[in-house]
Amino acid sequence: MDLIASLDRKLTALDEQSLTRRRRVVDTPSAPRLVVDGRPMLAFCSNDYLGLAAHPLVIEALREGASLYGAGSGASHLVSGHGRAHELLEERLAAFLGPHLESARALSFCTGYMANLAMLTALGADADAEIFSESLNHASLIDGARLARASVKVYPHADLDALAALLEASNASAKVVVTDSVFSMDGDLAPLPQMLALCEKHGAWLVIDDAHGFGTLGPHGRGALEHFDLRSSNLVYMGTLGKAAGVGGAFVAAHASVIELMIQRARPYIFTTAAPPALAHALLASLDIIGGDEGAQRRAHLQALIAHLDGELTPSRWQRPVSTTAIQPVIIGSNAEAMRVGAGLYRRGLWVAAIRPPTVPVDTARLRITLSAAHTHEEVTQLATALNELERTWDESQ
Ligand SMILES: *Cc1c(COP(=O)(O)O)cnc(C)c1O
């Protein structure tokens, strides 16, 4: 009984700080219009930025993949789980990003979380290596850096001078700079061209987590690499396949030697069952769309929606930091107020995620609006109108 009571005390403490999280049950495929806990809702929370998760061609490819390769992979990649579809997916990704990397090769993973653990433990394997990590990095990068033997230095958000000083002072055997490209809770972009110049000057790796850029940025959807036209053998690129690509999984693309080292040494790669090959097969269809005309049209529509929200949403009590990406935060401040705003929208049939610490810094609890190419202008207007009205009629004492 004491064991349970001590857990319950922790849970009560979370509840008192408005930090309890709850899951809602969605009955319908990923789309702006969902049925949530039995109720129709208009959602602005998914990372399905191009609306591919429920795309008929991707669904059909998943069916076909299951017929061709069965339901599961049966083993890890280094035993018998590396299927033809995984191999084709990796070849396709390496060719897609090849223009930006030297001797490009790609390695697929079940999730981005695993990919980041594998990449950082491989590059930061030695105790005399150093990882330079941006302060707003995703939890999976923070955990990857912790799991690596390298020492870790955190530099402030987008602070190039601080990063330059740390690199200058370092005599590590391997220097690894790691950053989100699009910050997942703010939507802003890291200054990647300047960071790459610094990395080249100091002989450091630049590891880019492009979870929110792959598929959405660049004329062909090649993400931050294409958006900034980055080209270097110092680049190590991580893209996720469960966001804009609409399926699941992730990959690392880099010089073939980086990939070979990960296959040989990265425990989060070696000691886990390969993803079902049918997912890789579905991803080939998704990549066809991303790299083709339809992908370009979807990206253009998404950009138009971002501009539209910008014009319609005009908060004064709450802060709206500049973001040119599909991630559009509204900073509320306190946890309790953010939860109340989220609940107010929810009562109006609008679902937007309220994000609290530790996902974001204390006192910056926020609504994280995410737009998708599957939204319409009218739906964006509906959200902006509801949020503007909630603010206008806001009652502190409520
Ligand atoms: C979502 C995300 C990940 C993790 O990817 P999964 O495939 O969901 O595990 C890693 N980094 C960033 C920045 C993300 O937003």
Image (cartoon, helix red, strand yellow):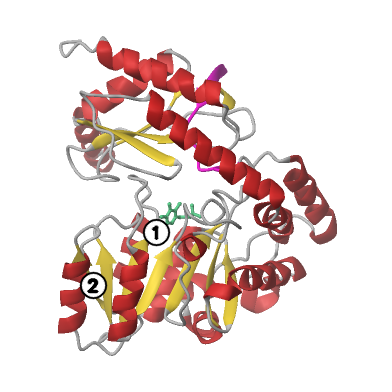
Which residue does the image show at 31% across and 24% down from the upper left? Answer: 314
Quarter holding ligand 1: bottom left
Element under disc 1: loop
Q: Quadrant of residue 300?
A: top right
Residue 290 appears in the figure: yes
Give whichever of 111, 258 is nearer the camera: 258
Residue 152: give its label: 2
Residue 307 within the segment the image draws in magenta: no
Q: Residue at x 41, y 66 (%)?
A: 208
Residue 46 included in the magenta stretch of the image? yes
Residue density around tag 1, few if under 14, some if 14–19, many if 20 or more, within 10 Å: many
Residue at position x 51%, y 41% in the image: 303
Image quadrant in which the C terminus is located: top left
Judged left or right of residue 363, residue 219 is right
Q: Amino acid at mark 2?
A: Val
Residue 38 position, x and y percent, is 57, 18
Asked if residue 185 is positioned above or below residue 39 in the image, the reply reads below
Compared with residue 103, is residue 297 higher up or lower down, i.e. above or below?
A: above
**Left or right of 343 on screen, residue 108:** right
Label 2, secondary structure: give it: strand
The tag on residue 181 is 1
Q: Which residues are magenta?
A: 38-50
Residue 93 picture quarter: bottom right
Name the mark nearer the viewer: 1 or 2.
1
Mark 1: C-beta under 8 Å from nearest atom of ligand 1: no
